[in-house]
Amino acid sequence: MSALVIGTRGSALALWQANAVASALREAHEGLRVEVRTVTTTGDRVLDRPLADIGDKGLFTKELEDLLLDGAVDLCVHSMKDLPSQLPAGCALVGMLPRADVRDALVCGPRMQGARSLADVPAGARIGTGSARRAAQLLAVNSQAVPTPMRGNVDTRLRKAAGPDYEGAILAAAGLTRLGLQNRIAALIPVDQMIPAPGQGAVGVEARAGDERVQSLVDAVRDRRTEACVNAERRILAALDGGCQAPLGAFIRFEDADDGAAADAERFLALDAAVLSADGAQCVRARLRRACGGDADAGALALDLAQEAIELLLKGGARQLLRPCADQGGAR
């Protein structure tokens, strides 16, 4: 059998993710040969402009998907928060690995070493982020902070955060942990202060639609719970965002019954979603929690929760908050 070829971006974090998929596949399928091929995407090449200025669809995925459709690779591995809600014709999302920590993390430079929360960020402190979602939620908690555009891979952003142009930065906790850089985390930001991007912390596998060989191989390493939650989060993204990289967060997760409940007590699916104005002054939220009978019901229930959240957000004025984003762009 020919080797299975995985396509990925070439950053350290992207390679970690691709190798995690490769290792899981090798462990599940004895004798399977897996190769990893790297490619540079538009989002990797163009680092001197905000993402919104170079487009908002497929900046970190298009070149990989072109290789996939041309048959040069058998599957692509993505950070799910970078994967557009609408995939190109001929491509399909075929699985996800178990999700890591979804939270965002505050990283402090030498002039902000005492900060242990967003509230501790001093007035005028420049906090690096390329994400409109992070910037808006930072301002909602601390209006005296100064979100400042920042691009680059994890190492680049950490270096910038320690330099003269920033006092700190906000990055995904999962990426820092995967690269063994958790010692750089000054604070893990609670979800009730900063709702993650749809799919944050999840690694996804994309293949050619109808490729039964790849699907059967990936089936052995898929995490259905992660997929149920992330697919529903992406439903919210598709309905409200539609490709504009907006100040929008959505997070769905399983929760156990309350402490002290019987061991066989029912579990729950919980949802938090928010759409914000760019300055964080306006926010529409949806918070929902429903009993979940079992994993077999989780996918449908998560989508039902997503639809209910969409209706609540729209009723609360989310469309009006997103309109400036549609005109100007911005990154999640």
Image: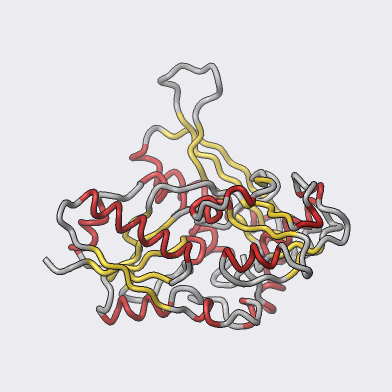
In the displayed structure, 215 sits above or below 286; it is below
Vertical order, 108 against 44 (above or below)? above
Which image quarter is the C terminus in?
Answer: bottom right
Left or right, 113 with respect to 264, comes to: right
Q: Is residue 245 visible?
A: yes
Residue 179, position as x, y percentages in the image: 50, 55
Q: Residue at x 74, y 58 (%)?
A: 109
From the top left corner, tell me how far across and down residue 103 is, in percent: 59, 48
Q: Nearer the viewer, residue 38 or 240?
A: 38
- For this orientation, the residue located farthest to the left is 1
Q: Nearer the viewer, residue 152 or 263?
A: 152
Residue 228 at what x, y percent from top left?
41, 48
- The colour scheme used to paint the residues is secondary structure
The mark total stands at: 0
**Location of residue 73 in the rendering, given as x and y in whole percent from the top left corner:** 28, 74
Q: Quadrant of the N terminus?
A: bottom left
The one nearer the camera, 31 or 82, is 31
Q: Residue at x 78, y 69 (%)?
A: 164
Left or right: 57 with respect to 152?
left
In the image, is 249 to the left or to the right of 18? right
Q: Is residue 307 visible?
A: no
